[in-house]
Image: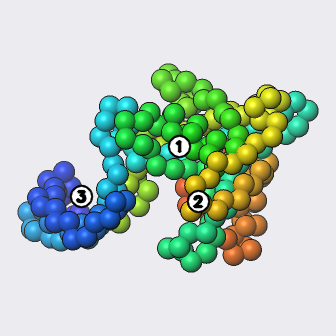
Amino acid sequence: MADDLCSSRSKVIDVDVKHATPWLEFRSLTYLDPTGATRRWDMVGRATRSESVKSKGIDAVCVFATLRKKGEEDTTLLVRQFRPPMNGETIELPAGLVDADEDPIVAALRELKEETGYVGTVAGDPSAPRGGVPAMTPALPLSPGLSNETVALVRVDVDLDAPENANPRQQLEGSEFITVLRVPIAGLRRTLDAFAQRGYNVFAGLYTMALGMEMGEGR
């Protein structure tokens, strides 16, 4: 039986960096499987990872923003951009890398401002008790069969009646070309389906979250 083997016996015993750039490393791993046999695995790792206390070992953040305006339904922000590995445009949450020794929540507010122009405040309490919804998730692996990259989802509130959000302007780098999409939170999964039908690549984590929200509403 497969469950007779304890996967905790497995461990990486050697890492060989085959190629590196300022952003990524291609690594060849040697590891022991649960039987003690030696095996190999290829992976891509973030060369920018910081293990500082502030960054909590989180490589990147993505932001689920709730935009609120008196008399209107709540909306959220998505971003559309060309992703070379996909050779096409994607639909994602605002996101970005956490700088060295940067608090992930600070990074989330910074990335939201840079990519969308909106100024947000943290939603909820990062230390919410059981039953509460935290402002930030733990470090979550994005594609553990390919990379050790982790991301944290941060919830942010945006007050559209506040003066700082009256005329939002992006603060993009020269290499960034991002279109901001403001969409209703209600029916988000159906909105994403419509994007997919038009040929856009919808980020898996975003779609999974939208599906979970729909399931939570009993649909």
SS at mark 1? strand
* Residue tagged 1: 153
Q: Residues within 10 Å of mark 2 (few under 14, many from 20)?
A: few
Q: Amino acid at mark 2?
A: Gly
Q: Residue at x 16, y 62 (%)?
A: 15
Q: Residues within 10 Å of mark 3 (few under 14, many from 20)?
A: few
Name the secondary structure under disc 2. loop
* Residue 160: quadrant of the picture: top right
Identity of the residue drawn at 31% across and 36% down: 52
Mark 3 or 2, nearer chain start:
3
Quarter of the picture containing the N terminus is: bottom left
Q: Are marks 1 and 3 in contact (CB under 8 Å)?
A: no
Left or right of residue 31: residue 193: right
Residue found farthest to the right: 71
x 73%, y 45%: residue: 169
Residue 174 image label:
2
Q: x, y (%) of residue 40? A: 18, 71
Disc number placed over residue 3 in the picture, else none: 3
